[in-house]
Amino acid sequence: MFFQISTMQTRHQDCSAYFEETATSCRNYYLPYIEQHTSLKFGRNCRVMEVGCGFGGILSIFAAKGATVTGIDIHKPSIETAKTLFAERGLKGTFICSDIFDYSDTQPYDLIILHDALEHIPEKERLMLHLKSFLKADGLLYLGFPAWQMPFGGHQQMAKNRIIAN
């Protein structure tokens, strides 16, 4: 058990590796799913926002396709890391450290991604209504969350307190 926790902590502490891992998941699974089931085209006229963007790996795939991307996260070190990792890769993106309920924007989004973040926001109904205000009329909300014991829900397994971690 200790080995698994140690491995999970290491995985989340290597920012570049975690960025690439989330980018790969997006490239191989989220993007093909969205492209197969919607009419969204991710060029320069497409606006994508991710709530709880972390290091920005997911957004990197949309940015590489030319979309205008915005990442929102309440954790300032993650936002700073996202800015650095995007710059290192020559990608353009806007990253904002903010509580999603304090964020506002006058330009609607084509796609809002809420991946592995919903479980951290207690006011889910309020959140859905708030996010709806940012979507275009034909916009899409992509929602994903880890199962409680899922191996990729690493932020849960990293907790130092075993009661919280398991």
Image: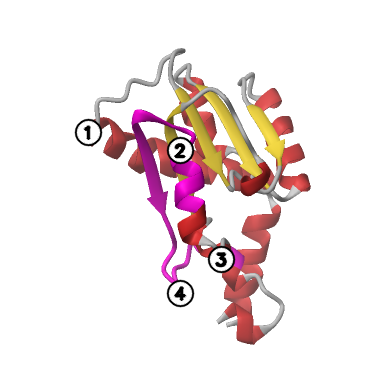
| Amino acid at the residue labelled 3 | Pro
Q: Is residue 39 left or right of residue 15?
A: left
| Amino acid at the residue labelled 2 | Ile
Viewer can see residue 147: yes
- Distance from disc 4 to disc 2, alpha carbons, whole Å, reads 26 Å
Element type at marker 3? Answer: loop
Q: In the picture, residue 17 is in which quadrant?
A: top right
Element type at marker 1? Answer: helix
Residue extending furthest toward the left: 37
Q: Which residue is mark 2?
A: 112
Residue 44: say if magenta: no
Earlier along the polypeptide chain: callout 4 or callout 2?
2
Residue 149: say if magenta: yes
Q: Nearer the viewer, mark 1 or mark 3?
A: 3
Residue neighbourhood size for the residue with mark 4, other residues' Cα within 10 Å, grouped as few (<14), some (14–19), many (≥20) = few
Viewer can see residue 116: no
Element type at marker 2? Answer: strand
Per the rendered image, the range of residues in magenta is 127-155
| Amino acid at the residue labelled 1 | Gln
